[in-house]
Amino acid sequence: MTQQTFSRRRFLEMAGLGTAALALPLRDVRAAEIRRPNVIVIFSDDQGWGEISCNARTDAPTPNIDSIAANGVRFTDGYVSCPVCSPSRAGLLTGRYQQRFGHYGNPQPALDRKQWGLPLDQKTMADYMKELGYATGAIGKWHLGDIAAYHPNRRGFDEFFGFIGGAHPYLNPTINSFNTIQRNGKPVDEKEYLTDAFAREAVSFIERHKARPFFLYLPFNAVHAPLDIPPKLADAFPEIKDPKRRAYARMQKSMDDAVGQVLAKVRELDLEHDTLIFFVGDNGGPTPGTTSSNGPFKGYKTQVFEGGIRVPFVAQWRGHIAEGKVESRPVISLDILPTALAAAAGKVAANVDGINLLPYLRGNRTGRPHASLCWKFAGQSAIRMGDWKLAQHEKHGVRLYNLAEDPGEKKNLAAANPERVKQLQKVWGDWDAGNVKPLWAPKRDAPWIDELW
């Protein structure tokens, strides 16, 4: 093992600094001897909050995803910045509310293609990491622009393997000629079940870049439709009687197994203490009937109710944050970028909305990371401030909930609390004043968007 591949823990032990030094920020330890930490961000697709078994009892266990929480932290109140795919990804990769730069909805084919995708003036997490000397790779679903200027290789990623559009079949993945599987812009003839292929490529990326800091963005398209069953799991979960639910469980197990392969490779290379890992969902599960569970929460994908925006959210960085921690303070996917950059001793632009979570996870800072969190999508808006949440719809009025008492958003308290409604509307309005107009008109992505209001 070379000096470069020594774990941070092992170096500190050899140097006689002891476990107390593990809590120090990287900038406080001699940079010449200690590499910057690797960062892995795993993003699932259309996976409801209740689908990881460390969040809720499920008939489709996720032991590998659960192990990230066991080795680190489970965020019970972890959110994304939009209840649909593309804006959620834009927020994650920039650390900014996507409304700040006009990315309100999924790009649509009928629009001016020059405006498709994440605006070119926005700095991505890969851009930041590349400036710090990281090897950068994206493997999986992109969905942030399909013309060449928006491709991952031009947005800070040294390597890309996956597809550019919003959805893709898992079996015979090369049959989708308009949204082909590609490697760095060139089509490839992929034969494996797509989730397995992404796992293979992720493990290869880690192996090839083990001697230097790397940033791996791994956005699976699982468990998004279609419900293509992994061939090697064709006999799994025979006890589940509903055929759609059984297919979903097999797909989710395939993704969980893929996460396990990534974690195993990190352990094999003795990089666990040198690797910050996040696993987050991109939005809530779709409408009931497509099998994904959002747990006890109201609503689903496309909606600003909890079921559409509260997602699986776990992280680990062994030796640097406590293990087995359950964190109930609200956080959002925008926080991943500044947290990763803080771990890497990098600087974040002043316009980033996310918060570095490390001081909160290490107990150095009390209180909530965010005074409020806000959403705006397709005629809907919402704000969470403390335990209070205000949800509004341009056609269906105002809803006020106390999430501590009513996490399922069953009791509308707006009429009984008019001053609270006004307070939250003002805070949301101040936030919205910092946004710009949509670069394209957000499409109402599903017919159920107005349901439950």
Image (cartoon, helix red, strand yellow):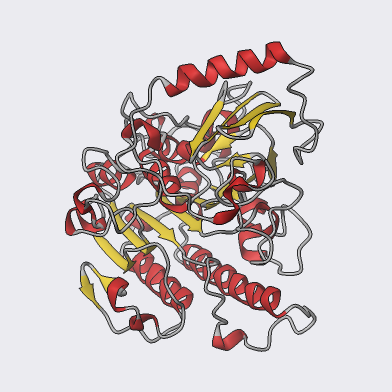
Find the residue positioned furthest to the front.
Answer: 395
The quadrant of the picture occupied by the C terminus is: top right
Query: Which residue is drawn at the image coordinates 70% and 73% (left, top)?
Result: 245
| Residue 392 sits in quarter | top right
Drawn side of residue 150 relative to residue 263, left or right = left
In the image, residue 372 above or below residue 150: above
Query: Which residue is drawn at the image coordinates 44% and 23% (left, top)?
Result: 432
Q: Nearer the viewer, residue 178 or 98?
A: 178
Q: Nearer the viewer, residue 404 or 375?
A: 375
| Residue 390 sits in quarter | top right
Q: Is residue 371 visible?
A: yes
| Residue 79 sits in quarter | top right
**Picture coordinates of residue 242, whole percent (x, y):** 75, 77
Count of numbered circles on the image: 0
In the image, residue 442 above or below residue 405: below
The quadrant of the picture occupied by the N terminus is: bottom left
**Picture coordinates of residue 354, whole percent (x, y):** 45, 31
Q: Nearer the viewer, residue 55 or 409?
A: 409
Q: Is residue 17 visible?
A: no
**Picture coordinates of residue 215, whole percent (x, y):** 35, 53
**Picture coordinates of residue 32, whole percent (x, y):** 29, 40
Q: Nearer the viewer, residue 232 or 4?
A: 232
Query: Which residue is drawn at the image coordinates 69% and 25% (left, top)?
Result: 388
In the image, residue 221 above or below residue 54: below
Find the residue positioned furthest to the top.
Answer: 419
